[in-house]
Image: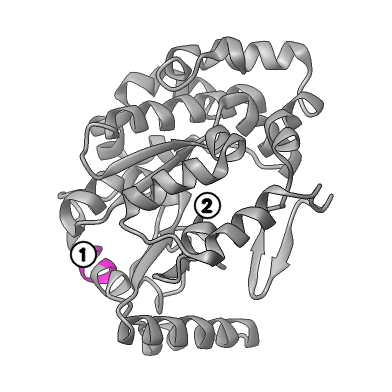
């Protein structure tokens, strides 16, 4: 999604500045602030440590000195040159920053209200997401949510009992469902904000040109010839069988694939019993976005 928005030629792509892992996060040249949790929650209570850093990032002001103080490997130096050049050229040519970051989800209300960002939130059906995470070998971390008292207070209190029951559980599937339910429950509330635009992954796959056209309008972008090419590249072909691959200096789990493969891959990754369990565990929140009988 981020790369197709970037195909407009009007944005500078910034990869996961709130990711607590390095890379791509913990790069003070990109975001000169200390990330302490996955799904970092920023609001009026703690914004003093974030406001200046995000203003720099959004204004495409790369901080070379803090970056050099923190990261020194040849890879980091190459990445610094890449981002430093992109930020500088983008600022001089009037481009906007595109923060492509799932870890920024819980800070969306602050980014919209305090910094005037337009937020595009991509959601995916629970069976599709759980199937994808299983393929990648990822495990949901609900402790990162529970460890942020103001986040729980402001957005996730209705999901506390569910999250706490899986915090130390070996039930990986149940933990994934608890995380999906809490995060997307919060997204349902965010839809009330005028500049939060929610799009479904399945719509982008089924009718990409129409869905991305709507997303371009939400983001104030102009459709470009390269956009059609990017969509074509992303929705055709079977994709690599590898879980991750490097694209330039970035490691990504993105794989071009056909609509049929993208929408039905979970059926080969989850048993019928697991699919039924995922649907049942997430039914209350899923109903806010999907007709689960069709998924």
Q: Name the residue under label 2.
A: 1
**Residue located 40% across and 75% down the image:** 28
Q: Is residue 188 visible?
A: yes
Numbered disc 1: secondary structure: helix
The structure's colour scheme is one colour
Q: Nearer the viewer, mark 1 or mark 2?
A: 2
* Quadrant housing the C terminus: top right
Q: Quadrant of residue 277?
A: top right
Count all numbered tags in the image, as a single digit. Answer: 2
Disc ID at residue 14 = none
Can you give x and y, in whole percent of width and height, for residue 246 in the image?
71, 67
Q: In which quarter of the image is residue 279?
A: top right
Asked if 118 appears above or below 84 in the picture, the reply is above
Dot 2 alpha-carbon crowd within 10 angstroms: few under 14, some 14 to 19, many 20 or more: some
**Residue located 25% across and 39% down the image:** 150
Give 138 or 207, whichever is nearer the viewer.
207
Marks 1/2: CA–CA distance? 26 Å
151 falls in the magenta region: no
Can you give x and y, in whole percent of width and height, for residue 268 in the image?
81, 27
**Residue located 30% across and 32% down the image:** 152
Please give the range of residues in magenta.
Answer: 50-54
Numbered disc 2: secondary structure: loop
Disc ID at residue 51 = 1
Can you give x and y, in whole percent of width and height, for residue 168 in the image?
56, 29
* Image-based side of 134 in relation to 190, left or right: right
Dot 1 alpha-carbon crowd within 10 angstroms: few under 14, some 14 to 19, many 20 or more: some
Q: Is residue 170 visible?
A: no
**Residue located 40% across and 56% down the image:** 36
**Mark 1 or mark 2, earlier in chain:** 2
Q: Main secondary structure of the magenta part?
A: helix
């Amino acid at each position: 999604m981020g790369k197709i928005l970037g195909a407009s030629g009007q944005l500078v792509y910034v990869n996961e500045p709130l990711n607590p892992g390095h890379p791509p996060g913990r790069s003070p040249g990109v975001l000169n602030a200390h990330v302490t949790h996955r799904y970092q929650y920023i609001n009026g209570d703690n914004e003093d440590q974030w406001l200046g850093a995000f203003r720099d990032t959004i204004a495409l002001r790369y901080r070379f000195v803090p970056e050099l103080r923190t990261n020194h490997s040849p890879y980091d130096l190459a990445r610094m040159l890449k981002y430093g050049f992109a930020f500088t050229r983008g600022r001089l040519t009037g481009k906007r920053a595109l923060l492509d970051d799932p870890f920024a989800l819980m800070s969306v209300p602050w980014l919209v209200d305090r910094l005037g960002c337009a937020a595009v939130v991509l959601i995916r059906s629970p069976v599709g997401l759980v199937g994808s995470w299983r393929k990648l070998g990822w495990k949901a971390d609900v402790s990162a949510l529970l460890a942020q008292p103001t986040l729980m207070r402001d957005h996730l209190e209705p999901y506390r009992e569910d999250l706490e029951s899986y915090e130390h559980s070996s039930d990986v599937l149940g933990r994934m469902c608890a995380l999906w339910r809490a995060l997307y429950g919060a997204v349902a509330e965010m839809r009330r904000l005028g500049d939060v635009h929610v799009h479904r992954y399945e719509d982008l796959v089924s009718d990409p040109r129409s869905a991305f056209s709507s997303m371009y309008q939400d983001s104030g972008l102009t459709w470009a010839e390269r956009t059609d090419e990017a969509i074509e590249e992303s929705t055709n072909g079977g994709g690599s069988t590898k879980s991750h691959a490097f694209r330039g200096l970035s490691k990504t789990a993105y794989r071009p694939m056909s609509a049929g493969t993208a929408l039905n891959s979970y059926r080969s990754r989850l048993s019928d019993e697991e699919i039924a369990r995922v649907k049942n565990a997430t039914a209350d929140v899923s109903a806010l976005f999907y007709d689960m009988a069709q998924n």
